[in-house]
Structure formats: C-alpha cells, structure tokens
Amino acid sequence: MMKKPSTNPRGKIQRKTREELNQEGRDRKRDKKHRGNVSGSRANGGGDASGSGRGKQQKDPRIGSKKPIPLGVTDTPVNKQHKPKSEKPMLSPQAELEMLETDERLDALLERLEEGETLSAEDQTWVDAKLDRIDELMQKLGLSYDDDEEEEEEGKEDMMRLLKGGN
C-alpha cells in the first residue's frame, strides 16, 4: 500500500498528506507488534522454526535427574543392596579345581614358602584362601590328598618287594 511520490506532468513532486503518513505509521507499528516469540516459549522450550528436528525426539530442556521417584509408601526398602556380579562365570567344581592347581601365581608363592621365605600379609591371605578353596573342592568331589599318598606308599612297597625279590 505504499505509494511512490508521484510526479506531476510539470515535474513537481507531490507530497503525502498527513492522513497517508499516519496510516503508514500505523501499518509499520502493526507489523512490528507481531515480531518475536510466542508467549511462554521460554518455559516450554520454544518451538523451533526449523523442520529438521521433527524426525528426532526433542531433548528435554529441564536439567537434573530423570529417575522416577516413588511418592507413596512402598513395601520394598529403599536401600537395596545389589549383589555384585561375579567376575567369572560359575565353573564346575572339577574345572575350578583344575584351574586352581595350574595357577602360576599360587605355584610360585608355594615354592617361595617351601624355600623358607616369608610372604607379605596380603600374599599369605591370598594363598590361604586358595588352599582352602582347593580343600573344599576336593571334599565336594570326594578326593583327598591322603588317598594319593596311600596309593604312592603302596606302590613303593610293591616296588620294594619286587626289588628285594619277595613274593
């Protein structure tokens, strides 16, 4: 609705009237009035004008924990102690016993003990725990060191009889 100043056939520029100037001023004011964000856009996270975010889920503008908090009285205790997951999967007693018997650290520490060295308190407790576990596993499996020693003694006696020439 803007009019250009028109020129008279004589070449004079015709000026706008006061009414025209006032109307243009009102139009500019109305246009300016509708700039900016809609009301509540700050609290509601604002509507992005770009359509790129529509495919994605919008990020929650609120900060803090999103963990739900029970508001009523609950039957379950709040402070539950979670069982730590075991570092290794459960092995069969036979497999665990075999693993303990082939443990290099345990063998090295036992050799040091046999040579008469004293171990640090931490190493000593570790060796004791492993030996106790070996004993438990052998009892579960029905094995014992005594059986092996008796078999060896019987074998030695048989060998001695053969060597001596006895019956």
Image (cartoon, rainbow, N blue to C red):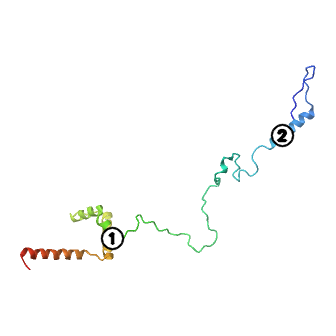
The picture quadrant where one finds residue 167 is bottom left
Q: Residue furthest front?
A: 167
Work out whether residue 129 or residue 154 is closer to the camera in this orientation and state it: 154
The picture quadrant where one finds residue 36 is top right
Q: For numbered disc 1, what is the local secondary structure?
A: helix
Give the percent coordinates (x, y) of residue 56.
Answer: 64, 51
Q: Which residue is mark 1?
A: 94
Work out whether residue 64 or residue 50 is closer to the camera in this orientation and state it: 50
Work out whether residue 92 or residue 60 is closer to the camera in this orientation and state it: 92
Q: Is residue 21 left or right of residue 155?
A: right
Give the percent coordinates (x, y) of residue 127.
Answer: 30, 66
Q: Residue at x 33, y 73 (%)?
A: 137
Number of numbered discs overlaid on the protein picture: 2
The picture quadrant where one finds residue 64 is bottom right
Q: Residue at x 9, y 76 (%)?
A: 161
Tell me, for residue 84, which label it has, or none. Answer: none
Q: CA distance from mark 2 to mark 1?
A: 90 Å
How packed mark 2 is, by other alpha carbons closer than 10 Å (few <14, some 14-19, many 20 or more), is: few
Q: Residue at x 47, y 68 (%)?
A: 83
Give the percent coordinates (x, y) of residue 84.
Answer: 46, 66
Q: From the viewer's perspective, is residue 47 above or below residue 3?
A: below
The amino acid type, in three-letter code, at marker 1 is Gln
Q: From the viewer's perspective, is residue 12 above or below residue 16?
A: above
Quarter of the image that includes the N terminus: top right
How packed mark 1 is, by other alpha carbons closer than 10 Å (few <14, some 14-19, many 20 or more), is: few
Q: Nearer the viewer, mark 2 or mark 1?
A: 1
Label whose residue precedes the other's in the sequence (2 or 1): 2
Q: Residue furthest left?
A: 165
Give the percent coordinates (x, y) of residue 31.
Answer: 82, 41
The amino acid type, in three-letter code, at marker 2 is Lys
Q: Is residue 84 left or right of residue 42?
A: left
Tell me, for residue 29, which label it has, or none. Answer: 2
